[in-house]
Image: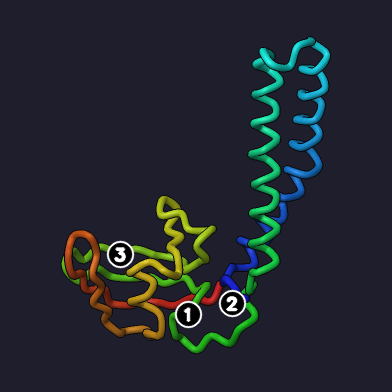
Amino acid sequence: MTLYPMTAHGAEMLRAELKELKSVTRPEIIASIATAREHGDLKENAEYHAAREQQSFCEGRIQDIEGKLSNAQVIDVTKLENTGKVIFGTTVRLLNCDTDAEITYKIVGDDEADIKNNLISVGSPIARGLIGKVVDDVANITTPKGMVEFEILEVQYI
C-alpha cells in the first residue's frame, strides 16, 4: 500500500469536506430525487436524471476522499525539530537570482497544491529541486521557461 504525504491542514480540510458531503449534500440530493420521483414518468424526467447524476458525483467524491484519507501519511512539520532543511510541509522563502524577486512557497501534498496561494505539490519540479537543501543553498531548477536559479533565504517549519 502506497502512503501519500499530506499536511495536517490538508487532512483536516478533506475531513471537513467529507463531513459536508455526508451530512448536508447527500441528504439534499436524496430529497431532490424523492421530489423528482413524485413528478411521474422517470424516463423523461430531467430533474430526476440531474439529481441522479449529482448523486453519482457526490458518492464518487465521498469514496475518493475516504480513499485518500485512508492512504494518507499526515505530516505535521510544527511537531518536527527545525533543522533548517527543506522537507515536505516546510515554508520556503526564495530569491530568484535572475530577477531578484522573492517568493515564498509551502510544499504540500498533491491534493492540496494551489499555485495561486503559493502551495506547491511535493512532486512539482520546484519542490523536488528544493527538498534536502538548507538556507543559503542555491537550487537550479528546470521550469517551463528554462533553468532558474533560486537561493534559499529562509526555511520555516510552520
Q: What residue type is labelled 1?
A: Ile
C-beta proximity under 8 Å, tags 1 and 2: yes
Q: In which quarter of the image is residue 40?
A: top right
Q: What element carries label 2?
A: helix
Image: 96 above or below 35 = below
Dot 2 corresponds to which residue?
77
Cα separation between marks 3 and 1 = 20 Å
Q: What residue type is labelled 2?
A: Val
Whether 3 is drawn above or below 32: the answer is below
The one of 88 and 153 positioned closer to us in this rendering: 88
**Would residue 55 be found to the left or right of residue 127 on screen?**
right
Q: Which residue does the image show at 50% across and 66% down from the upper left?
A: 108
Query: The residue under label 3 is which amino acid type?
Result: Glu
Question: Which is nearer the N-term, disc 1 or disc 2?
Answer: 2
Query: Which residue is found at the position 81% from the left and 26% from the top?
Result: 31
Front disc: 3 or 1: 1
The residue nearer to you, when weighing 39 against 69, is 39
- Residue 58, visible in the rendered structure: yes
Q: Residue at x 33, y 69 (%)?
A: 125
Q: Which of marks 2 and 3 is in front?
A: 2
What residue sits right under mark 1 in the picture? 87
Crowdedness of circle 1 by 10 Å Cα count: few (<14), some, many (20+)?
many
Q: Quadrant of the N terminus?
A: bottom right
The label shown at residue 102 is: 3
Give the crowd class for mark 3: few <14, some 14-19, many >=20 residues within 10 Å.
Answer: some
The residue tagged with tag 3: helix, strand or loop? strand
Which numbered disc, 3 or 1, marks the residue that appears first in the sequence?
1
Residue 141: x %, y % from top left: 25, 73
Q: Is residue 103 left or right of residue 122?
A: left
Indicate the position of residue 62 as horizontal and vertical percent values. 70, 49
